[in-house]
């Protein structure tokens, strides 16, 4: 029997309007009552779960920051972190001042963004950022200075390309300057930065070890390239019908799309009464 359900959110569990159906919620509760651990697995921080998941009584853990952390909501703490060391993060924040990006940094699940002390986000970030995460930030004239006062490691950076910046050029520049980091694109003007080696698959493996559950007893749902490591690690890999071709190449099963309750239908199949 599968004992862990690791599920990407955007484009996978969530419909395009960022909701889940009542039937999907009921199925998640049913298998949770059977002892299956529901593990949302996302690039979001633990503070940024969508309204559709907040308050679900059976939700205890979340794999966050694309594998950079696993959060325990019952104990209000991280049980796993793979972060960018504080001193290295400061070095990065100083360096990016000279390249055409608008920097943000995630620390303890909260984003520090270019803005001001009144939490006004700079106009460019407000224009291109995902609106759903703009509630979870602190504005700062100098992001490096604000981060330095936290005395904590950085869970990740999200860099917004300035107008006219060449994404490939910026990514190559950062990769050459900071080989300790993993530089990836998460959108046309978004660059994500994690410590090298971080991915959802590694985090899932570590979570299963902590829970004393064989990785073979996990199921992973995903739709995109940043889910591939998790699909490869899990005992069963399921990719959405709306998923990318790259992700589908790693699927044991291709299910219906996120808008057609693909996850719910597979739960009914894998965990039959």
Image (cartoon, rainbow, N blue to C red):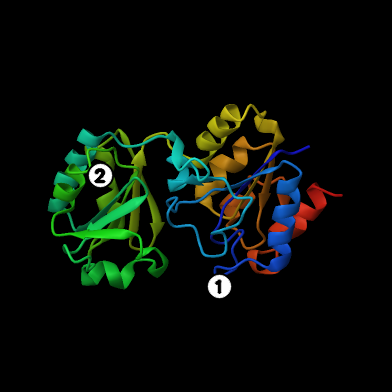
Q: How many labels were placed on the picture?
A: 2
- Indicate the position of residue 242 as horizontal and vertical percent values: 62, 63
Residue at (51, 36) in percent of width and height? 203
- Indicate the position of residue 260 as horizontal and vertical percent values: 70, 68
Mark 1 closeness class: few <14, some 14–19, many ≥20 residues within 10 Å: few
Which labelled disc corresponds to residue 52?
Answer: none
Is 14 on the left or on the right of 100, as rendered? right
Residue at (44, 40) in percent of width and height? 77
Is 39 on the left or on the right of 128, as rendered? right
Q: Does the rendering let one see residue 166?
A: no
Q: CA distance from mark 2 to mark 1?
A: 34 Å
Mark 2 closeness class: few <14, some 14–19, many ≥20 residues within 10 Å: some
Camera-side mark, 2 or 1 = 1
67 and 172: which is toward the camera:
67
SS for callout 1: loop
SS for callout 2: helix
Residue farthest toward the right in the current orientation of the protein = 273
Residue at (72, 41) in percent of width and height? 35
Q: Quadrant for residue 174, please give it.
A: top left
Disc 2 + disc 1, Cβ < 8 Å? no
Which labelled disc corresponds to residue 174?
Answer: 2
- Indicate the position of residue 24 as horizontal and vertical percent values: 70, 61
Q: Which residue is mark 1?
A: 17
Q: Mark 2 or mark 1, which has the lower sequence index?
A: 1
């Amino acid at each position: 029997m599968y004992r862990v359900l690791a599920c990407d959110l955007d484009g996978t569990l969530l419909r395009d309007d960022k909701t889940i159906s009542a039937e999907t919620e009921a199925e998640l509760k049913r298998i949770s009552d059977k002892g299956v651990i529901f593990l949302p697995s996302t690039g979001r921080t633990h503070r940024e779960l969508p309204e559709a998941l907040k308050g679900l009584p059976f939700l205890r853990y979340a794999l966050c920051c694309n594998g950079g952390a696993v959060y325990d909501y019952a104990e209000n703490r991280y049980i796993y972190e793979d972060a960018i060391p504080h001193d290295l993060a400061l070095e990065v924040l100083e360096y990016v001042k000279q390249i055409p990006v608008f920097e943000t940094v995630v620390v303890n699940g909260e984003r520090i963004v270019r803005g001001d002390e009144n939490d006004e986000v700079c106009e460019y970030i407000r224009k291109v950022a995902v609106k759903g995460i703009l509630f979870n930030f602190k504005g700062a004239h100098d992001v490096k200075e604000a981060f330095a006062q936290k005395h904590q490691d950085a869970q990740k950076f999200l860099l917004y390309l300035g107008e006219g910046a060449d994404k490939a050029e910026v990514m190559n520049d950062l990769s050459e300057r900071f080989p300790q980091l993993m530089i990836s694109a998460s959108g046309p003007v978004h660059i994500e930065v994690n410590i090298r080696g971080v991915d959802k698959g590694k985090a899932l493996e570590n979570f299963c070890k902590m829970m004393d559950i064989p990785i073979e007893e996990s199921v992973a749902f995903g739709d995109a390239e940043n889910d591939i490591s998790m699909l490869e690690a899990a005992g069963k890999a399921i990719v959405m019908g709306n998923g990318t071709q790259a992700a589908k190449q790693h699927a044991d099963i291709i299910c219906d799309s996120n808008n057609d309750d693909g996850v719910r239908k597979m739960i009914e199949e894998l965990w039959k009464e």
